[in-house]
Image (cartoon, rainbow, N blue to C red):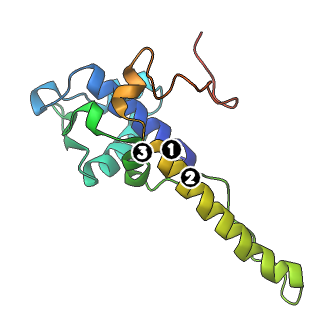
Amino acid sequence: MSDSQRFPVAAHALAYLAHKGAYGPEAAAPSAVLAASVPTNPVVVRRVTALLAKAGLIATRPGASGGAWLLHRPENIRLDQVLKAVNGCAHLGSPPAGAKGCPVGQHIPRQVAKALTAADQAAAEALSKITIADLLAEDSDVLRPFAPHASCPVAA
């Protein structure tokens, strides 16, 4: 799974768990069920849920009766926490090393790296205002001003 897909899969899985009321092991959602909702492979979901569990956002239980469940209410899970849990960033790329001896090649990579840090900080700040509950809301006050990103497929 590409790094750029971990965050959307994680947000989707958390929203699914909240929608289904999975707040304890008795209501755990198996990775195959989560994967069918995304849709993706259950292995992808297990990798993401392992990261979410390590961050303390969910708990998981392996095996035939296993699955994942939320440890927090959806209104208390901010998307910046989700991004951090899956080791995400703004995914704008990384600057090449630059050519030695070239004044531009030696200077620009460092400056581009600073610009990427600024973008990551801006993304984290924006995501800190959005919760899993906002994703589930039909008309969230936080998300109302925005249109879906142009690169994302939108269900009709």
Which residue is at a point 24% across and 27% down the rendered structure image? 29
Q: Nearer the viewer, residue 44 or 19?
A: 19
Residue 117 horizontal side relative to residue 65, left or right: right
User: Spatial distance from mark 1 to mark 3, Cα to Cα?
Assistant: 5 Å
**Rendering coords of residue 2 (x, y %):** 56, 48
**Rendering coords of residue 87 (x, y %):** 44, 56
**Rendering coords of residue 150 (x, y %):** 70, 29
Q: Earlier in the sequence, mark 3 or mark 2?
A: 2
To which residue does mark 2 refer? 122
- What amino acid type is highlighted by mark number 2? Ala
Please identify the quadrant where the C terminus is shown: top right
In contact (CB < 8 Å): disc 1 and disc 3: yes
- Circle 2 — which element? helix
- Circle 1 — which element? helix
To which residue does mark 3 refer? 128
Report crowding for label 2: few under 14, some 14 to 19, many 20 or more residues within 10 A (C-alpha): few
Is 113 placed above or below 145 here? below
- What amino acid type is highlighted by mark number 1? Ala
> Residue 145: which quarter of the image?
top right
User: Spatial distance from mark 1 to mark 2, Cα to Cα?
Assistant: 6 Å
User: Spatial distance from mark 3 to mark 2, Cα to Cα?
Assistant: 10 Å
- What amino acid type is highlighted by mark number 3? Ser
In contact (CB < 8 Å): disc 1 and disc 2: yes
Report crowding for label 1: few under 14, some 14 to 19, many 20 or more residues within 10 A (C-alpha): few
To which residue does mark 1 refer? 126
Residue 99 horizontal side relative to residue 13, left or right: right
Which residue is at a point 52% across and 22% down the rendered structure image? 144
Report crowding for label 3: few under 14, some 14 to 19, many 20 or more residues within 10 A (C-alpha): some
